[in-house]
Amino acid sequence: MKKALSLFLIIVLCLSLTACGKSEAVKNVEAMIDALGEITLESIDAIRAAEDAYSALTEEEQKKVGNYETLT
């Protein structure tokens, strides 16, 4: 289930990066981070997906991710 959710969120992020709105990409990364909830051993795939999505952002977009500290 978590792998499917992670894959879905990555696809959404990729689609949003091809659109003109960079703010949507930032919102998608923030949503991925918020979706992590309580961290357990099973969270590793979702964490990696969020990290990959964050890494795909430009430096300017990364600065706009308000909940990045939660991911780290």
Image (cartoon, rainbow, N blue to C red):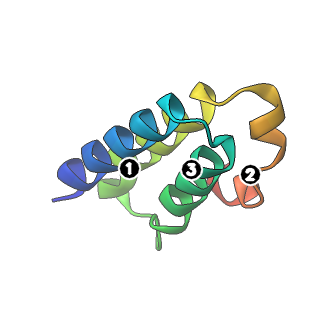
Residue 14 position within the rendered picture, expressed as x and y whole percent measured from the top left: 42, 33
**Seen in the image, is 66 located left or right of residue 52?**
right
Nearer the N terminus, badge 3 or badge 2? 3
59 w.r.t. 30: above or below = above
Which quadrant holds the N terminus? bottom left
Q: Quadrant of residue 25?
A: top right
- Separation of marks 3 and 2 at Cα, in angstroms: 7 Å
Measuring 72% from the left and 61% from the top, which residue is drawn there?
67
Residue 50 position within the rendered picture, expressed as x and y whole percent measured from the top left: 50, 44
**Seen in the image, is 68 located left or right of residue 46?**
right
Which residue is most to the bottom?
A: 38
At label 1, the amino acid type is Ala
Q: Nearer the viewer, mark 1 or mark 3?
A: 3
Task: Classify mark 2: residues with Cα within 10 Å, few (<14), some (14-19) or many (20+).
Answer: many
Measuring 83% from the left and 33% from the top, which residue is drawn there?
60
At label 3, the amino acid type is Val
Residue where numbered disc 1 is placed: 46
Residue where numbered disc 3 is placed: 29
Nearer the N terminus, badge 2 or badge 1? 1
Q: Are marks 3 and 2 in contact (CB under 8 Å)?
A: yes
**Seen in the image, is 53 located left or right of residue 63?**
left
Q: Secondary structure at mark 2?
A: loop
Residue where numbered disc 2 is placed: 65
Measuring 46% from the left and 47% from the top, which residue is drawn there?
47
Nearer the N terminus, badge 1 or badge 3? 3
